[in-house]
Image (spheres, helix red, strand yellow):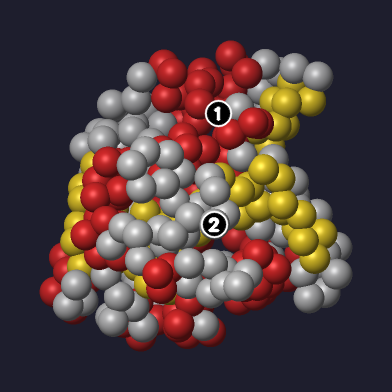
Amino acid sequence: MDNEFEDFFYTASDGLRLYARLYGAQDSDALPVVCLAGLTRNAADFHDLAVQLSSGRSPRHVISFDYRGRGRSAYDPNWRNYDPIVEAGDVVAGLTALGIEHAAFIGTSRGGLITFVLAAMRPGLLKAVVLNDIGPVVEGSGLAQIRSYLERAPKPATFEEAVAIQKSAQKGVFTKLSDADWQRAVRAIYRDENGRPVPDFDPALLNTLKSVNLSKALPEFWPQFMGLSGLPVLAVRGENSLLLSPETLEQMEKRHPDLETITVAGQGHAPLLETAGLPGKIIAFLRRKTGEPTASAKRAA
């Protein structure tokens, strides 16, 4: 698998060493794609999608980031820097180091919130957006479920046990996944330490969830979402998601002038983007909305 992407290390503004995976030719004329994962996840989540995006008749350069404290990026000694604004700055630093001025963005959960920040911070950077199971209203019940699981997550001794744990935890939520899907998903969550699965993120990251007061209404991000109103957006929702409600998705469609939606049957938060025909739908969306190739999508000289 490792020969399908290149390792890219760079330095954040505060000196932390950060990491991203690079897929496909960096001099492709097609608009590059930036992949941003969920709270505790990393670049591995997007591997199969990135391989498909970076191959075929109009291959795109794909950059998939590990945020600070996740995957192969360094852990931050101050957990309060595990913040979407800081992480958005890290993404900008990485893209600047790569010389990328414009891109399409695919954001899963936390990655979608970071995309909102980027739209305010560097609006010219974004040319199209795919939001995976995230919107301007984050349901408290969904966040509570995520926090509860992460705080009480069992520690599997083997990858087979890790798969069994995930299946049990998601019983009735992800009903359409194959055994291969479960195996792949687990390998993206855990790193392999001498055959033992270990969660691939800084445990201090959970402090960010503990600091959220779920007894109060969570802030809404409609102004930030509407910062994407000048861009084509594809919003993906898991049919069984507790984080993004059908009502919020409907409001997103009503308020955004160029938004398409997909509801993924038999999946929850967040749908696996390499399943359910989603790669083809995402590729088709990017072709319709950004063209293939365009001179304006070239990497900066």
Quarter residue 216 falls in: bottom left
In the rendered image, which residue does mark 1 sit on? 186
Q: In this rendering, does residue 200 appear at all?
A: yes
In the rendered image, which residue does mark 2 sit on? 27
Q: Is residue 89 above or below residue 272?
A: below
Q: Is residue 156 above or below residue 27?
A: above
In screen coordinates, is 233 left or right of 41? left
Mark 1 and mark 2: span between their CA atoms? 33 Å
Q: Nearer the viewer, residue 128 or 301?
A: 301
Q: Amino acid at mark 1?
A: Val
Q: Is residue 80 above or below residue 120?
A: above
Instruction: Identify the element where label 2 is drawn.
Output: loop
Q: Position of residue 45 (x, y in %)?
A: 52, 41
Q: Position of residue 197 (x, y in %)?
A: 70, 25
Q: Position of residue 204 (x, y in %)?
A: 75, 55
Q: Nearer the viewer, residue 120 or 76?
A: 120
Q: Amino acid at mark 2?
A: Asp
In screen coordinates, is 69 left or right of 280? right
In screen coordinates, is 50 left or right of 90? left
Name the residue at 54% across, 57% down. 27
Q: Position of residue 82 (x, y in %)?
A: 68, 65
Quarter residue 189 falls in: top right
Name the residue at 46% across, 44% down. 54
Q: Nearer the viewer, residue 32 or 258?
A: 32
